[in-house]
Amino acid sequence: MGATVVLVVGGLALFSNLRGLDAERVAAGVRASGALGPLALIALLVVQAVVAPLPSPPLLMAGGFVYGPLIGFAIGALGLLLGASACFALGRALGRPFAERFVSPQRLAAVDQQAGTKSGAFLTVLSLRLFAPPLFDAVSYGCGVVRFPFHWFLLATALGEVPKVASFTYVGAAAGGTPTWLSTWILLAPVIGLIALRLLRRAARTSRAPAPS
């Protein structure tokens, strides 16, 4: 518990020094944290998701720049997942009035309607993660408010954040050079994800279609 408090306080202190700065300055701050750098970066990603005055791309790029594409990706993915989970928990615990500070009532109503069927809700959240990155935190708060099942939320977020994390981590890592196979994967991953999502949607529609009598 004590270690958690130290990490959160340290992350907040680093956060206050890096607000509005670019990825290079963020990377310098993370390096200054020494062995606690990865944990400080994760703490920053959680804080920015909850209070949101600092966008996540500079943090993701800093992770790639400092730790390389693979470790940087792991740090970024975990940080975004924990941040999204924190927003989800706050939305569920504090309710709609709190979430409406971040999400419009109309958008909350739309998420509520989509949550009627598990398969449809899951694909909707996955689509928003893939194709509407600016709504990342709003979706997290909204899913908590409308009682979206947490395990489906976690899975949709873990899958849907991959292109965003991979892209910005790659941009940061590219400053130090990246292998050809990784460059190819970064270019192909969004296309593969889009094809997979279309196939999932088609399968979901087929399963919900009434059987011929």
Image (cartoon, grey):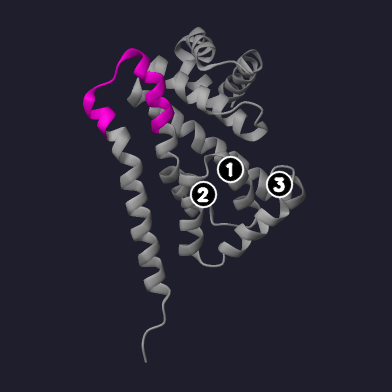
Q: Hey, what amino acid is under mark 1?
A: Leu
Mark 2, residue position:
128
Residue 73 point in image, percent of width and height: 39, 28
Q: Residue at x 50, y 31 (%)?
A: 79
Quick one: label 2 or label 3, which is nearer the N terminus? Answer: 3
Mark 1, residue position:
135
Whole-angstrom CA distance, mark 1 to mark 3, is 13 Å
Q: Hey, what amino acid is under mark 3?
A: Ala
Tag 1–tag 2 contact (CB < 8 Å): yes
Mark 3, residue position:
99
Q: Secondary structure at mark 1?
A: helix
Q: Nearer the viewer, residue 75 or 172?
A: 172
Is residue 139 left or right of 103 when viewed as pictured? left
Whole-angstrom CA distance, mark 1 to mark 2, is 7 Å
Residue furthest right as drawn: 97
Residue furthest bottom as drawn: 213
Q: Residue at x 44, y 35 (%)?
A: 164
Q: Which range is magenta? A: 166-184
Whether 105 is drawn above or below 38: the answer is below
Say few, some or many: other residues with alpha carbon within 10 Å of mark 3 (under 14 / 14 to 19 / 20 or more). Answer: many
